[in-house]
Image: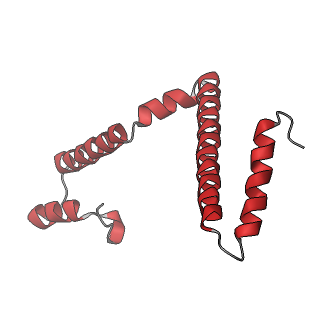
Amino acid sequence: MENKHAQGKTRRTERVVQDNQQITLDDRVSVLSEQVERLAIHMEKANFADYVQLLNRPRRMIFYSLVGGIARGVGLGIGFSVLGATLVYLLQKLQLLGLPLIGDYIAELVRIVQSNLGNPYVR
């Protein structure tokens, strides 16, 4: 990004001014053309046209938002299940070690989880 100086001049236009001491119309057009070209390149990189097209179609935006929400929800559910199963597995292994203070607590927790796994209606 070019820094703006006094009177809205950029470094590029200052170079032109230093050469001629007055900006001609052709110089202004060439500087403006370069700036527009840079802006167009940045907008292409940001997929700005696709975003504007998406905003012009609210049904499509709602559909994509719905699908994205469902995917996040399913991913969260799967991730929590894997994490929970890993935790229960580690607790079972800790129970086998027979730790004196937390062994009874872990055994009770594992027994509750295993009894609920066989019961389709969790109380």
Residue 91: quarter of image: bottom right
Q: Residue at x 74, y 61 (%)?
A: 107
Which residue occupies the extreme right position in the image? 123
**Relative to 98, 118 lies left or right:** right
Q: Please name whichever residue, 4 or 90, is drawn nearer the observer in this view of the structure.
A: 90
Residue 62: quarter of image: top right
Q: Please name whichever residue, 12 or 63, is drawn nearer the observer in this view of the structure.
A: 63
Residue 60 horizontal/vertical position (percent): 59, 23
Residue 81 horizontal/vertical position (percent): 64, 44
Which residue occupies the extreme bottom position in the image? 101
Residue 119 horizontal/vertical position (percent): 83, 36
Which residue occupies the extreme left position in the image? 19
Q: Residue at x 62, y 48 (%)?
A: 85
Q: Relative to 61, is 110 above or below? A: below
Residue 12 horizontal/vertical position (percent): 20, 60
Q: Please name whichever residue, 76 or 19, is drawn nearer the observer in this view of the structure.
A: 76
Q: Relative to 13, is 36 above or below? A: above
**Relative to 56, 18 lies left or right:** left
Q: Residue at x 82, y 33 (%)?
A: 120
Assign the N terminus to one quadrant of the image.
bottom left
Q: Residue at x 57, y 31 (%)?
A: 55
Q: Relative to 6, is 38 above or below? A: above
